[in-house]
Amino acid sequence: MSTQILNALPDIPRLYTAISEWGACVVYLFAIRRRVPLVRTGVCLLLGLITLIGVQYWAGTLPLAFWIFSMCLAVAVMYALIVLASGVSILSSLYLVVRAFVLAELVASLHWQLDSFLRPKNGSTFAPASIGLLMLIYGASGCIAWLAERRNFADVHLPPPQRSVFISLVIAVVTFAMSNLSFVSTNTPFSGRLGVEVFYIRTLVDLCGFAVLFAQQEQLRQNQANAELASIDARLDSQHREYLRSKENLDAMARISHDLKHQITALRMQVDPELKSQDFEQLEQSLQRYGSQQHTGNPVLDVVLSTKERICVQEGITISVVADGGLLDGMSPMDVSTLFGNALDNAIEALKQVESKEKRLARLALYASGQFTLIRLENYYMNSLDWRSDGELKTTKRDEGLHGYGVKSIRHIAHKYGGEVSISAQDHWFSLCVLLPMKEGTLSLVNCE
């Protein structure tokens, strides 16, 4: 089969290829949330650039048969650079390096095609005009790619699913093979025979490959966002159903308690007080405990607090509540039950891990501060907290796919009313603070999505 290309363009300088590969790594290193200090990233980038240049020039001394090997070696250096400079997992780095490789191929091919078209026949590839074009194409392409990928990776948790990594790897391999097919053989239906035509095909195929990878990441981001919203909605619905059941139980308990108090009074009149007084006092105290309810000024909050206080009594947890429920006027019943239900559930879950009953303490306060409604819940904790790179707490439960959305649900509700959530931990005290702005003394929705 013929491999001869008519009017073939010169090969892309090794230096330009190395810079393109390095620049693509820079794009993705600054598009994701790195887990290492910026100084480490800078040192790794400097060493990575030197290594990539060295690998490219060394590969230029090898026979043509080692072309694939030299490309794999360059990709391996890019992979090591991303691993060391980002601190993300091995799987995440593999996902990033295949995207960086396709981007590097696209930028290098696009620049060389334009440079070969604009440069005079006898002009030097290192002439000021050529260097200026290099900086323009590489810089503009890198900035555009960074802006696009930063949005694509902003809300996505790494590492991605293994299936997505495999698909991206296949896309990158197919893109590389098709874009360089003409250099292997011009005698195929997908090959070019002219130098300009070959680079046109290469640039177009690389652009399509990058576009497919971009669309794949966009779809992954959408899927993860939809999964989180579905989990939050499911938790909202579960909290609301729990509230309705709790309200029915509390109403029934209050009626039973009220009726039994009258029955106890009647019994006292019929029996000897000296013999049965102590037993009746204990029974009345027990009924008083189960028949009592919170009265904050918000009936939904009353039900939630009464239900959670009963759980606290069963678990040996001491909780103090100072709440002005009237400040929640304007918040929907479902949001009230979900917000406080999630917050108290998280606190109770943490306090169950505390061995000492004396340290199972929680404090809840709901009060006005200026033009804001402030909700503060504090609880003691023993186990160390595990923070994720996005500032959220990792769930302590084994199944992260079904748990860990409590704080996200609280934050989602706070944002609906224009508020913010802050979390802090100090001296084994965990503090959750929700700040909600009031308009004319009441809460109002600012985002109904």
Image: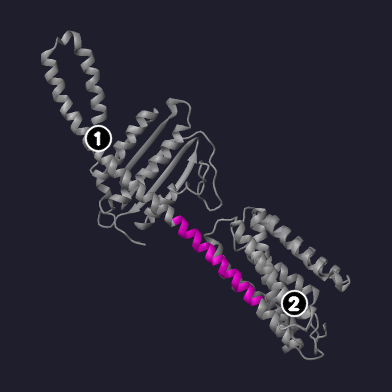
Q: Is residue 170 above or below residue 378?
A: below
Looking at the figure, which quarter contains the C terminus?
Answer: bottom left
Q: CA distance from mark 1 to mark 2?
A: 75 Å
Residue 42: quarter of image: bottom right
Is residue 147 at all visible to an observer of this figure?
no
Amino acid type, residue under disc 1 in the picture: Gln
Label 2 Cα neighbours within 10 Å, binned few <14 / some 14-19 / many ≥20:
some
The x, y position of residue 96, in whole percent, is 65, 62
- Three-letter residue code for mark 2: Asn
Residue 392 visible to an observer of this rendering: yes
Residue depicted at 79% across the width and 81% down the height: 185
The extreme bottom residue here reads 121
Q: Which mark is residue 293?
A: 1
Where is 426 relative to 288, above or below?
Answer: below
Q: Which residue is mark 2?
A: 180
In the image, is 1 to the left or to the right of 162?
A: right
- Name the quarter where the N terminus is drawn: bottom right
Magenta-drawn segment: 206-228
Q: Are marks 1 and 2 in contact (CB under 8 Å)?
A: no
Residue drawn at point x = 53 percent, y = 53 percent:
390
Magenta stretch: includes residue 404: no
Where residue 338 appears, x then y in whole percent? 35, 48
Say whether residue 220 is magenta.
yes
Against 210, residue 407 (above or below) is above
